[in-house]
Image (tube, rainbow, N blue to C red):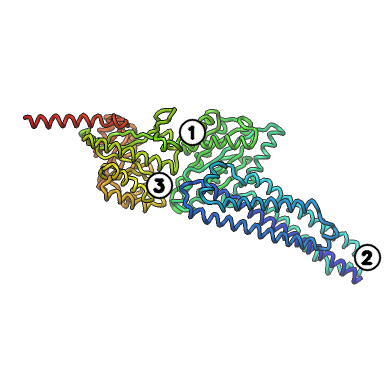
Amino acid sequence: MTVLIGATFLTVKVALDRHSLQQNISYIIGRQFIRFQQLANQTRAVMRASADPNMPEYIIRPMVEDIQKAIDDIRAMSVQLDDLNSQVAANLLERLNGRDAASERMRIELAGRLEDFLQRAERVVSTKLQERRERYSFWGPIDFAVSSDSMLMRQFSAVIESAHDRSDLSIDHARLISAVLLSLTAATLILATLILFIPLLIKLRTEHRRTLDFEIKLTHLAHTDTLTGLGNRSSFNEALNELFGSLERAGTGFSILLVDLDHFKATNDNFGHPAGDAVLSHVAEALQKTFRAGDFVARLGGDEFAALLPGVTDAAALDEIAARAVAAIAAECCFEGRLLPVSASVGGAIVPGYASDEATLMRIADLALYAAKTKRNTAVIFDESSFAQRLEQNRLAAALAFAADRDEFVVHYQQKVNLQAGEHLGFEALVRWRHPQLGILPPGRFLPLMEGHLIQSMTRCIVDIVARDLSTWKAAGLRAGSVAINLPEALLVSDDGYDLIAAAVKANRLDWRDFAIEVTEDVFLNRGAEQIAETISRFRKEGVSVSLDDFGTGFASLVHLRDFPFDELKIDRSFVAEIGKDIRSEQIIRAIIDLARNLGKRCVAEGIEEESQRDFLLNAGCEIGQGYLYAKPEPAGVAVEGLASRRAARNITAIAKIAG
């Protein structure tokens, strides 16, 4: 009897040990799965950051180190799993039951696929920044890990389920053996059972329930974005698969909306990542309030969100929903006592209207989103016209890459005049693109497509053209005044902008005062604002006039105006256009003119097209202006015709005085 009791006790203990090992295996697999999800997201972030030519390498480097740490953690967990599986294999019940060949094969296959994924991730982080940037531009927006996400997720789930089934089998065997042995021990053994075995069985069942609860929590974490509480990319993919399955079974259509925040990087850079997190939480809450209870809302990563709307197949209805989402996101977002600027671009598509599979749907939704981002704070639902527009923009963007090398950028000059006397004071240089097929294109057609090095290359071309024109005019004895050039922030955060103008002055034997520099209010929010201020100060020491362009439309504060070195404020044309129509715009113009006067700065009005506008500006105290009332932006030869006429008149007057 003692032997039977001991055998029964050992049987239950062996089962409990085996179950504990299996529980540890399930726990580590779950941790490994979550670490895998984090690695996928981190790798996406590095690829996106590497694609941004303005992203400093010191920001990317810690991200790369985090990815390598995640890879090492996952491999360490794989070693632990191998050790635990070896202990399970040595367990007596496991040897009696026999190894499950299918489960073992599945576990080995998962390990192989996971290692392949880790090697690919290592290749991403081990490459140089430039190589990642070039490869990402060919891979496009489809993440290299998306296909792996779904397959590995299913395999993780299958391995966890297999481990759970083996635990149940071990428990069942333990119960059967215990029942047989206990039936032989009679009444005395029952008493021993009450004392020894029931507590063990209760613990076994408790551990089993804890395992089930833990697996439920792991599943929830694996499908939820921790910051916003929305679904993540994995759960979005599952929901999308289910909707396409419903489409095949019952023909039930649906719609998709992709949401991308406008200028989110600037929010992170200027206000810090906690402010960025507050914006993301605000957007998540706005989207949840906008959509129905049955709609699925997810954060795909970074500042990208998506919504799936079952049963919505009408373009007008989808457009109305998307407009509500844009308005909800643009509502006030407060963080630490300040209002954060928040807006979003939304692109939508309908299934099966223009797509019948996932790849096509995501592609056309991206096209609609791209069309929306060209306007900002708006929604676009995909149709043939948006597709055609995207194709045209792609062609223009491709041609822009070679425009500077082919000398296709040209400069038109618009006069700046004294409003009282109408006298010429100088020019503003405005870029145009001489497209080989489309002819002269205005900046609104191509500037939104330019980023980073393209803008810098274009600016270098403009400076060279202006310098040559100034040299020609001065040689002809023309008094052109200073020519204003808009320098981008990328050339001001280093010595490049200063060196560029200095080289033009030296090569063309010009005076520094022949140039003027225009900057926008965005420089105040740039991380390198201090360096920009230093560069601007160097220009002013050389006698170069500095203008704050488009004043009143950005983020300038009185502190910025007090501390930033500049010589004149330019009133944006949007205010000038409302003179005589909107009393509020007139009040703003008067306030800007008074502010400039009190700071000892000049004030310039842009976009003057009517006599009434000029009269108002003169009465308000503005002395300098430009606009179609005086001259349109014109090629160099046309722009200086009036200067040549005035020079001839001066010569005639001088000759007459000598003759007299």
Which residue is drawn at the image coordinates 64% and 37% (left, top)? 358
- Expressed as whole percent of the image width and height from the top left, the position of residue 209 reads 74, 57
Q: Earlier in the sequence, mark 1 or mark 2?
A: 2
Task: For the residues labelled 2 and 3, say whether their Cβ atoms are less than 8 Å apart.
Answer: no
**Disc 1 from disc 3: Cα separation:** 24 Å
Three-letter amino acid code at disc 2? Leu
Image quarter hosting the N terminus: bottom right
- Expressed as whole percent of the image width and height from the top left, the position of residue 11 reads 84, 65
Three-letter amino acid code at disc 1? Gln
Which residue is drawn at the image coordinates 63% and 53% (left, top)? 118
- Expressed as whole percent of the image width and height from the top left, the position of residue 129 reads 51, 50
Q: Can see residue 363?
A: yes
Reading the image, the residue beneath label 1 is 393
- Expressed as whole percent of the image width and height from the top left, the position of residue 551 reads 34, 42
Task: For the residues labelled 1 and 2, say whether their Cβ atoms are less than 8 Å apart.
Answer: no
Reading the image, the residue beneath label 2 is 184
Residue 490's tag is 3
Three-letter amino acid code at disc 3? Ala
Give the label, 1 or 2, closer to the camera: 1
